[in-house]
Image (cartoon, rainbow, N blue to C red):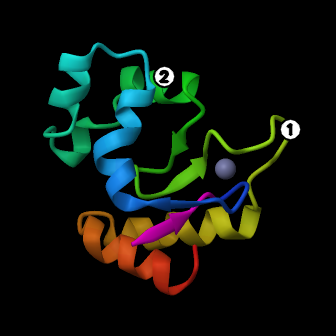
Amino acid sequence: MDVHCTTCGEPWNVYHLWQEAIFETELADKEAKAWRSLPRNRKLTPRYRAEFRAAGWEFGQGVINVTRCPCCPDDAQPDAERLQTKALLEAMLGDDEDGLAATFEDHNF
Ligand SMILES: [Zn+2]
């Protein structure tokens, strides 16, 4: 399943977001590995968000909702309508990340 960056539209495989993107950060290998098994609500604490941001990633409530990615041009801004719609879907389905990813894929988000 692929989801798309809200800002540049780049497709990202959800497996990459769940399992691999964390290794693009400066976190030590051991910590990055441990991150993968954290519960969803502990994956994007301010500290991890800062690590991801430094690597070019920004997310909504969870990593399925990519709002900015390493492919984004520096001055690019997120599409406001898409940002809002994805936030709404995430609020409804966020606890079910598979369902959310499938819904994003269905809508080409
Ligand atoms: Zn992007």
Point out the tag, 2 or 1, that comes first from the N-terminus: 2
Which residue has dot 1 on it?
A: 75
Task: Find residue 47 and report its horizontal and vertical position in percent.
Answer: 38, 20
Q: Position of residue 93 (x, y in %)?
A: 33, 72
Q: Nearer the viewer, residue 7 or 95?
A: 7
Q: Which SS does the magenta portion mostly show?
A: strand
Q: Which residue is painted at 60% across and 32% down in the image?
A: 56
Label 1 crowd (10 A; few <14 / some 14-19 / many >=20): few
Taking the image as drawn, is residue 12 in sight?
Answer: yes
Let me know if residue 63 is in the magenta part.
no
The residue drawn where x is 34% and y is 29% is 45
Q: Is residue 62 visible?
A: no
The quadrant holding residue 51 is top left
Q: Give the vertical position of 6 relative to 18 (above or below).
A: below
Element marked by disc 1: loop
Which image quadrant is residue 25 in?
top left
Q: Mark 1 belongs to which amino acid?
A: Asp
* Highlighted range, magenta: 1-5
Q: Which residue is mark 2?
A: 50
